[in-house]
Amino acid sequence: MMKKFLSPTLLLLIFFLLCTTTSGQSSSPAAAPSGPTTPSGQSSPPAAAPSGPTTTSGQSSPPALAPSVPLVPSGPSGTPSGSLDITAILKKAGKFTTFIGLLKSTQIDAEINNRLKKSDGTTVFAPTDSAFSNLKTGTLNSFTDQQKTALTRFHILLSFLTIPQFQTVSNPVHTAADGDTVAFPLNVISDGKQVNMTTGLVNTTVDSTVYSDGQLAVYEIGQVLLSEGSPPTSHAPSRSTTVSVDSSGATGPPQCATIVVSIGVAVLAALPLCI
């Protein structure tokens, strides 16, 4: 008689314990705090981002302007050392080794020198070696010869422009990249002292005047002018291969199935007591 009374009671007790355990596991996690709070309990507003570099007096300092003094001075006849050669100018200035290599491998250095012999004006935007080193590893090696030529031409204007004259150009600026302003768009904004330019993928500025003689102007820029016409691998961001994991345990068996199995085991364990 005592066994018949205890058996249903034991079953109900086991079932109650199982329900209590599963309900405790399914409770929702605590919400993350919305932000830092003050001692009074109210959320403090985020700190405002600084508007720009400031001087010791607290006022914003103006942006650095491109130096007006060329890094490579021209000779009495308007040429460095008496002969005008684009690669010689860049070598004398230093820090343009990679760009010199592009000019030579594409033979665009000879095209520029031939233009200068005909007294045709030319403007060159020369990326520094640091600018090329900031590119994704293997970018230049992934370019075909034709793509290297187009990239190099994109850094050349078929006219002579001083810094103040950039105020008068019409956007998009036509470059030596076959005048293609769709695949190679170059937009310039200038206040007569500073020159900012964008290709849609790259924003940069003229950092300094390397050379200027009234026919040839060479300007240092801090980034390589990549554009939509450049190979996709040169500017496409690397994709993350991380796979998100659902912390709710959706990959395991359903929770209801676990409860059913546990109840079944408890019933089987209690059957000998009922007999």
Image (spheres, rainbow, N blue to C red):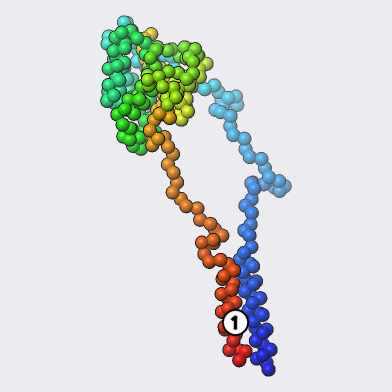
Q: Residue at x 58, y 67 (%)?
A: 255
Q: Position of residue 34 (x, y in %)?
A: 64, 48
Q: Is residue 194 in view from this perspective?
A: no
On the image, which quarter does residue 16 sit in?
bottom right
Q: Position of residue 199 (x, y in %)?
A: 46, 26
How many marks on residues?
1
Q: Residue at x 67, y 80 (%)?
A: 12
**Extreme-bottom residue of the structure:** 1
Q: Residues within 10 Å of mark 1 (few under 14, many from 20)?
A: some
Q: Position of residue 80 (x, y in %)?
A: 30, 12
On the image, which quarter does residue 224 sit in?
top left
Q: Is residue 149 in view from this perspective?
A: yes
Residue 220 vertical position relative to residue 35 in the rendered view, above or below: above
Residue 76 vertical position relative to residue 199 in the rendered view, above or below: above
Q: Is residue 210 left or right of residue 11?
A: left
Quadrant the C terminus occupies: bottom right
The residue under label 1 is 267
SS at mark 1 in the image: helix
Quadrant the N terminus occupies: bottom right
Q: Residue at x 72, y 47 (%)?
A: 40
Q: Position of residue 86 (x, y in %)?
A: 31, 17
Q: Residue at x 57, y 75 (%)?
A: 262
The front one of 203 and 53 is 203
Q: Is residue 117 left or right of residue 205?
A: left
Residue 74 vertical position relative to residue 182 in the rendered view, above or below: above
Q: Say which amino acid is labelled 1.
A: Val
Q: Is residue 244 left or right of residue 3?
A: left
